[in-house]
Amino acid sequence: MKKLILSTIMAGALAVAANAQDFNKWSIEFGGGFNKPMAPLTGGYLSPTLNLGHVEFGARYMFNEKFGLKLDYGFGTVKEVKDESPEFRTKYNRLNLQGVANIGRIMNFESFTRRFGLLLHGGAGIGVVNPEENRFNDFTDNVYTLIFGITPQFKISEKVALVGDISTVLNGRQTVTWDGATFIYPDINNGFYGANGTWWSGTLGLNIYLGKAEQHADWYIAADKYATKEELATQINGIKDMLKDSDGDGVPDYLDKEPNTPAGARVNAAGTTLDSDGDGTPDHLDKCPFLPGPASTNGCPVEEVREEVDFLKKAINDGYVNVYYAFDSDKPLGYSVSAAQYVSNFLKRNPGVKVEVKGYADELGPEDYNIKLSERRAQAVYDLLVASGIDASRLSYKGYGEDTSVDKSSADARQMARRASFEIK
């Protein structure tokens, strides 16, 4: 166990050192999809709710993992609803400089996903609206634009992300309606004031990340960085010292509340010797660990009674017989595997008894994931019992998900929650 923990922590430390490299900051972006002019339109003129005819592309630079700038260009054509509106066809284009906020990093999306992200963007620029039909078919409407949008992301690889975008654009100083049939105001000069035109676009496209670093700022998760190799070496040496297991019971000294446990003793997660039946004889010396008896008979009752099942049930209900797991693992911790062997020995002595293995998880992580994790933990112990010679017909297992009875803010309490227990049927 100690070697496993040490290798895991050292691998994590080396990963931190590797991730200390700068992230990529540049990306190029392109997409295509729909547009919808909302206003102004001449009375009787209608535009489709989803008009296929918008294209955009741009370049983005991120100052850090959370904020950046992008310059993007969009163009397209709007037209009428066929058979429901007089004909019109108007082309437009826009060029915008926008600020970008990476909501995925700001709101710590990494706590539940490493694939989905979200960007917000907004800014201003210039644009042109060119009606090609109706009264103003040769008119060029020069406008300023205000744009706001939201961009969901899905990371395909470290270099490519699939993105969608929905943006609202306000055209300032637009003087002619989208259909090109009328002035917005009788006096053309009145149109020089305010955001007179409104439209939106919806696209699907790709972000291509540029640079030599492993990750782009969109997906980079800042970790604690060691300033020097010497500092990293000091930290690893400290970890090695912390993971020493002086008494060899499988529990590192920094967690061990009984640092001088006798060799071969069965201990709990805190490294304390177990005495399941409370008779004063520790389990590793007790030939009847679930039947109280004097030390003179090695912990067995002087007159053996047929109430062993009741004593075992009491031991289980009091939480003495459990198999424990590391965080996010379904592999039993070595020091607790003997609990399964005790149950196996009892079943062999009592052929009429059946047992259910019950898996649990702590409250960290999504609830549906913890249900599946707890079931895998229960199945792991079930497999141990079957491998020890117990007929599968006498066994069952079930995952009960999160154990909410413990204090989830306590690391020791969460360790006790990550377990598989037993119930005599």
Image: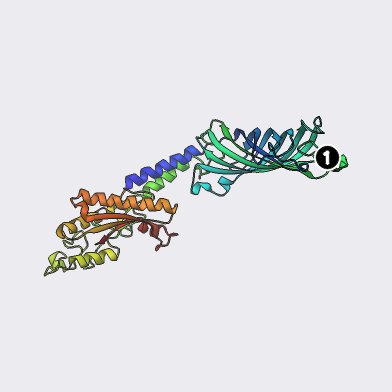
Residue 211 visible in the displayed image:
yes
Tally of numbered discs: 1
Q: Quadrant of residue 146?
A: top right
Residue farthest to the left, as pictured: 303
The residue lying toward the viewer, choosing from 386 and 32, is 32
Q: Would residue 368 be found to the left or right of residue 52 on screen?
A: left
Residue farthest to the front, as pictured: 83
Say few, some or many: other residues with alpha carbon within 10 Å of mark 1 (under 14 / 14 to 19 / 20 or more): many
Residue 216 visible in the displayed image:
no
Residue 3 in the image, given as x and y percentages of width and height: 32, 44
Residue ID at (75%, 35%) = 127
To which residue does mark 1 refer?
183
The residue lying toward the viewer, choosing from 218 and 287, is 218
Residue 230 in the image, given as x and y percentages of width and height: 46, 40
Residue ID at (44%, 44%) = 234
Q: Would residue 421 be found to the left or right of residue 157 on screen?
A: left
Q: Would residue 367 be found to the left or right of residue 301 on screen?
A: right
**Colouring convention used in this rendered image of the protein:** rainbow
Q: Would residue 218 be found to the left or right of residue 350 on screen?
A: right
Picture layout, residue 19 above or below residue 243? above
The amino acid pointed to by label 1 is Phe
Q: Quadrant of residue 266?
A: bottom left
Picture layout, residue 96 above or below residue 407? above
The residue lying toward the viewer, choosing from 338 and 388, is 388
The residue lying toward the viewer, choosing from 304 and 274, is 304
Residue 332 in the image, given as x and y percentages of width and height: 30, 50
Please identify the quadrant where the C terminus is shown: bottom left
Label 1: element kind: loop
